[in-house]
Amino acid sequence: MKQARKYFLLALVLIVVDQITKLLVKTQMAYDEEINLIGNVVKLHFIENRGAAFGLTIPRLLSGIGIEMTEETGKLILTLFSIFAVCAIGYVLVRMASHKSPLPYFIAMIFGGAIGNIIDRTFYGLLFAETNNYEGGLFHGRVVDMIYFDLWKGYLPEWLGGGYMSIPIFNVADSCISIGIVVILIFQNRFFKMDEQAQAATTQPAQSPAKSDAADMADTDPALHIITSDSLHDTHDYDGHSGEDSGSDSGSDGGGSDGGGDGGGGD
């Protein structure tokens, strides 16, 4: 759990930034108001999303297969499902906290972004009940969106479903979720290879510095490897000859002693 603290701290920072921007927009801008930030391209445009990403709602999805559901029921189901999903992401973050790659950071981004939007869905319908332009309540709030890149808008061709379309308006939490998911999908194999390599490096037996340096020098210089091998061979030969000489000397001394003893016995 200690290893996961920095990742939960990152998630907390993202949640705070997300909520500050939403509260400023919610309290300082009128609904559907637009403010240019960078030319006519990057704008603040205050809307409230009653569904999931890109305004999708459960009743709208179910209506396509012939199932009818009220907007309020669909909103409650979406909020409760989001809470369950966040708990699952938090559990994964704790389990992956020891991963030796940037993977936990991007899981923390998804975790923080998901909580940021859950706060809107859970509490904004109650906290701003007097100023909301919808009937809210606990678990029936709408997500505040405000970041808008006004690059294209128009009508889709019929083979794409038709209808008016523009680039979706999003918030800080949406950005965190999208970045985290995209990066993990693209680099997940690399992240797991990094972890495997780090784990393998920590499990290898440690070598003494002298042996490691000698092995590295021998690998880089073949001539030095030959010299080193010859030196070791000469050393073994010297030790063998020294043993033989010592044995001969001992034998000679023993012979002298026996002679002396025989001489003494003759006397």
Image (tube, rainbow, N blue to C red):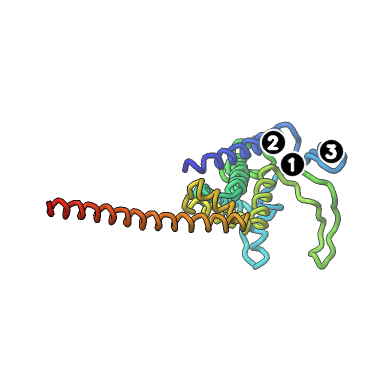
Q: Name the residue under label 1.
A: 146
In this view, 105 is above or below 74: above
Q: Is residue 43 left or right of residue 108?
A: right
The residue indicated by pointer 3 is 38
Crowding at dot 3, Cα within 10 Å, few <14 / some 14-19 / many 20+, comes out as few
Mark 3 or mark 1, which has the lower sequence index? 3
| Lateral position of residue 37 relative to residue 77, left or right | right
Q: What residue type is labelled 3?
A: Ile
Q: Is residue 16 above or below residue 89?
A: above
Q: In this rendering, does residue 20 appear at all? A: yes
Q: Earlier in the sequence, mark 2 or mark 1?
A: 2
The residue sitting at the front extreme is 267
Q: In which quarter of the image is residue 21?
A: top right
Q: Please tell me the numbered disc located at residue 21.
A: 2
Q: Which amino acid does label 1 sit on?
A: Met
Q: Distance between the residues labelled 3 and 1?
A: 14 Å
Residue 188 in view in this figure: no
The residue at 21%/54% (across/down) is 259
User: Along the line of sight, which residue is nearer the eye, 159 or 238?
Assistant: 238
- Location of residue 155 in the rendering, given as x and y in whole percent from the top left corner: 85, 58
Q: Front-most of 121 and 63? A: 121
Task: Label 3, secondary structure: give it.
Answer: strand
Q: From the top left corner, tell me how far across and down residue 132 is, in percent.
A: 67, 39
Considering depth in this image, is 220 or 79 the residue closer to the camera?
Answer: 220
Q: How many marks?
A: 3
At numbered mark 2, what does the secondary structure look like: helix, strand or loop?
A: helix
Asked if the residue under mark 1 is in contact with the one under mark 2, i.e. CB atoms within 8 Å, the reply is yes
Quarter-of-image position of residue 115: top right
**In percent of the image, x 81 and y 52: which residue is there?**
166
